[in-house]
Image (cartoon, rainbow, N blue to C red):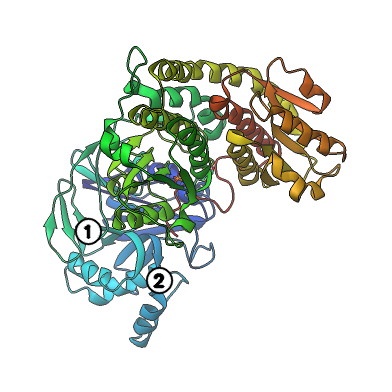
Amino acid sequence: MCGIIGYIGHEPNPEIVDILIDGLQRLEYRGYDSAGVAVMTEAGLELQREVGKLSNLVKKLASIELIGRAGIGHTRWATHGRPTEYNAHPHTDPDKQLVVVHNGIIENYLDLKEELAALGHQFASETDTEVIAHLISHYYQGDLKEAVQKTLLRLEGAYSICVMHVKEPNYLVAAKTSSPLLLGKGDGVNFIASDIPAILRHTRDIIYLEDGDMAVVYPDKLELFRIDGTPLERPVQHIDWNLVAAEKMGYDHFMLKEIHEQPAAFSQTLGGRISEGHQRLYLDEINLTPEQLKGLNRIYIVACGTAYYAGMVGKYLIEKFARIPVEVDVASEFRYRNPILDGQTLVIAISQSGETADTLTAMKLAKQQGALTMGVINVKGSAITRVTDGTLYIHAGPEISVASTKAFIAMLAAVNLLALHFAQVREQISLPELTAAMHELRRLPRLMEETLHAVEAPVNALSTVLLRYHHCLYLGRGINFPIALEGALKLKEISYIHAEGYAAGEMKHGPIALIDALMPVIAVVTEGDAYDKVISNLKEVRARDGLVIAVATVGDERIKDVANEVIYVPAVPEWLSPVINVIPLQLLAYYVALRRGYDVDQPRNLAKSVTVE
Ligand code: F6R
């Protein structure tokens, strides 16, 4: 969390503030409690910070002219210290000779602060970051790189930092451990950023820093070291995302745009991975041999939030097609419960960002314990992809809205591919069955388009109904239980209405006590094995005056007997229904949040990449 940007060029640049602000805008999903920039001008360091969203800082900067060769910027998700201007980054040393921006948490900052206070340092903020700035100045003896190095050796915890010193205007210093940081190679200019979209306007050549790396960034060269000073090289990765994909393109919000991009995201994940005649899958990048796949006796899927729900769908699919037992774990739990892993266990991380700290740590643990590992990841070269044996990229393109939608759909495409691939290799599926399944997968993007077209207007109208309520229950069964959970998560995270997802059959074991006229129930009740059972569950709700909104298969008339409102979606085989059924639930959350007047793309207290544990 928190977004960092750094820029350095040869000449004083009158557009430096625009470059920094543009970068921060594209990082604002990482936090929006405060923002700040520092620019190395002819007159020295200029620092501007403002509490609240980036737009507040932009207003403040409108009347200030800053021209400089180098600058750093930061958008904050508060950890240590309340969101105030004095806690905003960049932070300085006592003599205002250097500035630091930081993403992460320094666990031993109080000890360091005490030590520095004993030496006479006075602090202007409550942050751990200011301690870093003071420590660098403490060690500084004319060589910024060396002072940063000594400082890093004292830090415990997670950090990515970018440092600029008034006496050494020719370079910036960057370093990272745990929190993400990358370098962008431009033409006579170079960049430092927390994430690719921040610098995509200027370069597509990226170097990811690894934990324990430091970089000295000049306008025309990049020097990389380990913290102990050992020089090193890291590969340059060429990023093929285009900038247009990171713009709103006429939509009011990124979330709505990304919902509409889902058919394309799904197709991109299938990509060239299905053979022409639908007879086999090409998933070589997962780096698992047929022998390894045949020898598996268990799969764990670890992930967080929305990605975890994609993992739950994956469990149903892999167990259905490949007949391998699958456990799905919230990543933050997996690593603390001493899981039983060995060389016949495959641990799959699912993550849009590839940077989620809990998922990353879980994968490191799986690797240490000798399990086979792979990632289902969106962001190329991200931290998890550097830990796992293989990666199945979902190719959803940049997802900007904090609430994940198109990455979820692309993850569903990926777990379908994995399930069918595992099934084929383990000879659990006949060729005609496989061909038919892949044919169905290929049809889905068109059916998703149809769904978007059919449901958007009715869901928008229905969103007014939900405005009256403070709570909501989402029900689903089987492969649509995770969709109920995802629908509830979407509603609560952007509209702040309390919502819970439940397996419909569990309702009578407790939550039914909540049902009354004030508790609407949103049920996923499309055609499938448990259809009749869900209908019975809904009758129980109606009998207690609950309002029922159903997502049902087009042509289903019976549902009208139990539902007050019905959203019809196209018919698809049950195992593919999550891909279709989640669409109206995403749109419902979007329109409810919109009508409640909330900032859909940047919900309160959240950040898109959760890089702290
Ligand atoms: C919800 C949401 C989060 C993420 C979770 C994992 O809309 O976006 O729940 O799904 O933080 O993030 P990734 O997929 O980047 O690991």
Dot 2 beta carbon under 8 Å from ligand 1: no
Q: Position of residue 364 (x, y in %)?
A: 33, 55
Closer to the camera in the image, 116 or 36: 116
Residue lying furthest bottom = 118
- Residue pictured at 33% horizontal, 53% vertical: 342
Badge 2 or badge 1: first in the primary sequence: 2
Depth order, front residue of 259/165 = 259
Q: Is residue 478 left or right of residue 204?
A: right
Find residue 187 and report its image quarter. top left
Amino acid on which disc 2 is placed: Glu
Task: Name above or below for residue 613 compared with residue 489.
Answer: below
Q: Residues within 10 Å of mark 1 (few under 14, many from 20)?
A: many
Mark 2 or mark 1, whichever is nearer to me? 2
Residue 62 in sight from this viewpoint:
no
Q: Position of residue 456 (x, y in %)?
A: 65, 23
Residue at disc 1, CB closer than 8 Å to ligand 1:
no
Q: Residue at x 33, y 13 (%)?
A: 276
> Which is nearer the eye, 581 or 297?
297
Image quadrant in which the N terminus is located: bottom left
Residue on which disc 1 sits: 214
Residue 307 locus on image (x, y percent): 48, 42
> Label 2: which residue?
107
